[in-house]
Image: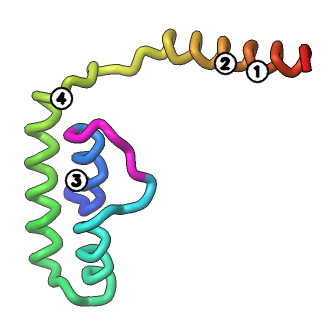
Amino acid sequence: MRDVRDEQRVERLDLLVVSLATVQPWLTWLRALRTGGKTKEEALEAAGDLEARLEDLLSTSPLPPHPDREAADRWMIEAYLSTWSDADRG
């Protein structure tokens, strides 16, 4: 499904970062789209371009195909135990 929000997905795979807010230049572009400054055709073209970029990134991203949930769970438990251990000492 084409979606102009694909830009955030591209950012995650290409730059390996997550921006919680939309960053430039897409912030200005999306505002223009929302206020009628872009046509439906422009929106579909942008979404198609982003979708193609996503397809490329999915095959070249250094990220693993699935998250390491066990490592994340271990980290979370260690952080939790460390925080509460420090609180008990203080």
Question: Percent x, y for residue 9?
Answer: 28, 46
According to the picture, the residue beneath numbered tag 1 turns out to be 83
Residue 89 placement, left or right of 81: right
For the record, the magenta segment spans 14-19
Prevailing secondary structure class for the magenta stretch in the rendered image: loop
Dot 3: element: loop
Give the Cα distance between marks 1 and 4.
34 Å
According to the picture, the residue beneath numbered tag 3 turns out to be 1
At label 1, the amino acid type is: Thr
Question: Percent x, y for residue 89?
Answer: 90, 14
Give the Cα distance between marks 2 and 3.
38 Å
| Residue density around tag 2, few if under 14, some if 14–19, many if 20 or more, within 10 Å | few
Q: Is residue 1 above or below residue 35?
A: above
Front position among marks 2 and 3 = 2
According to the picture, the residue beneath numbered tag 2 turns out to be 79
Q: Assess whether residue 18 is covered by the magenta stretch.
A: yes
Q: Which mark is residue 61?
A: 4
